[in-house]
Image (cartoon, rainbow, N blue to C red):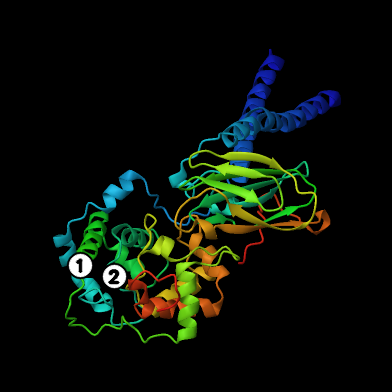
Amino acid sequence: MNWRKLRIFLVTVLVLCVIPATRYYQIDKPLLRFLKSSHHVDPLSLHLSGEFVENNLGTEQDPDGSVTVRMIAQQYLFVPHCILVPAGVPVHLRITSADAVHSLTFNGTEYAVKVLPGTISVAQLQFPRAGDYKTVCREFCGAGHYAMRSELRVVPRDQFPVLRPEERGNCAAQ
Amino acid sequence: MQRNNRRASFDWSLAWLMAVIVATSSLVLVATDAAPDRVPSLVSWTPETIAAASSGEPFRGMLLAKRCDHCHGAEGFSPIASTPNLIGMNKLALWKQLEDFRSHKRRSRAMEPIAESLSSRDVSDVVSYYAALPVFPDPQDNRVFPGPQPDPGRAAIASRLVTFGDGERGIPPCQSCHGPVAYRTGVPSLATQNGDYVLNQLEMFADRIRANDINMPMRTIAALLTAEERRALAEYYGAGLGLQPASSTGPK
């Protein structure tokens, strides 16, 4: 009889663990990944919902040690205005435009990312050396184009702040 | 027989248990995955929004605007330096601010209750009235608008920022969005704005007390400006120097 009780207990525990785990890994995670990997966004309502809401911009710490950087390019600013990434770590850049066509380049590197309104430009970057890089728009985007610059701060890996999953890092003046 | 019954009841309890687990797990997942989005403004400049904002009737707006006169002036120029002039305001800019006051995305003890008392039709009517209001050649009100001329040093700082911005720090020129060179959608003209109001708003943007700019351009720029530069810009616009495009040869 005790064996039977034990069996019921074990099955209950198993069910308790398996159902949410299965649901999360088989349904929610692929669904979220699918929703996030969509490369189309509405440039007019970036601020209302989705990936590019204000508190999701900046550097996100991924579980595998790499980082994801989300940015908006608009006339005539990159937001956030100063990006903070660790050196020697893969950086997944996701950037979209709110209005015109921009091009994000990092002075001193070969990277150039074309930014179009309505789509998310994705790039895999890596900065081996720590330092400050100027971020420049190299696609004429309007009257203030020549002042459209911001900063990329690459810090040594041990100086990069520990980010909680919901936290986004940047070095813009607060 | 009795044993069979017992087993059936056990199955039911297990089913209930499963249902409860699924429900709670989904609740937990929803709660953890949906981080609260910080939305600066409910307005987005879709064609429908722009059509709604520009569909106002200026005559009805004029009657409604009688209650704005006390603070914002009968001719659109405010008698108080820290209150904005509404003359020459872009329709969309004014409409967005009223909508933000209505949705409490922009905070103001005075304007939130007033904007709440307006319907969306009232808002577009008032807005179209102020957009159509001409600048009268013989002012009858006690406006503060063309403030005292700033000292040449500060005017030079402001003129440089308005015309060129600061490429080194990544500050775009003011006139590339606030006119008269170019306007972005929903951006107010600063040519006839009161200096104290401009200064207040720049400081509130820098401190993030005011946070209703879409995709945070003004919060970023105001934080990049120094306190001295903010004051210089406020004095520049408050003195009416923004009425003509700043020349490339330096301050006027």
Residue A48: percent from left, percent from top: 47, 48
Camera-nearest residue between B59 and B110: B59
Chain designation of label 1: B
**Picture quadrant of residue B25:** top right
Amino acid tagged 1: Leu
Camera-nearest residue between B43 and A102: A102
Instruction: Say whether residue B232 is visible.
Output: yes
Q: Say which element carries label 1.
A: loop
Which image quarter holds the N terminus of chain B? top right
Residue A57: give its label: none
Residue at x 76% of width, y 32% of height = A13
Q: Is residue B235 above or below residue B88?
A: below
Camera-nearest residue between B127 and B236: B236
Q: Say which element carries label 2.
A: loop
- Classify residue B35 as left or right of residue B75: right
Residue at which label 2 appears? B86
Residue at which label 1 appears? B133
Residue B196: percent from left, percent from top: 40, 80
The reply to whether dot 1 and dot 2 touch (C-beta < 8 Å) is: yes
Residue at x 58% of width, y 58% of height = A149
Residue B148: percent from left, percent from top: 36, 87
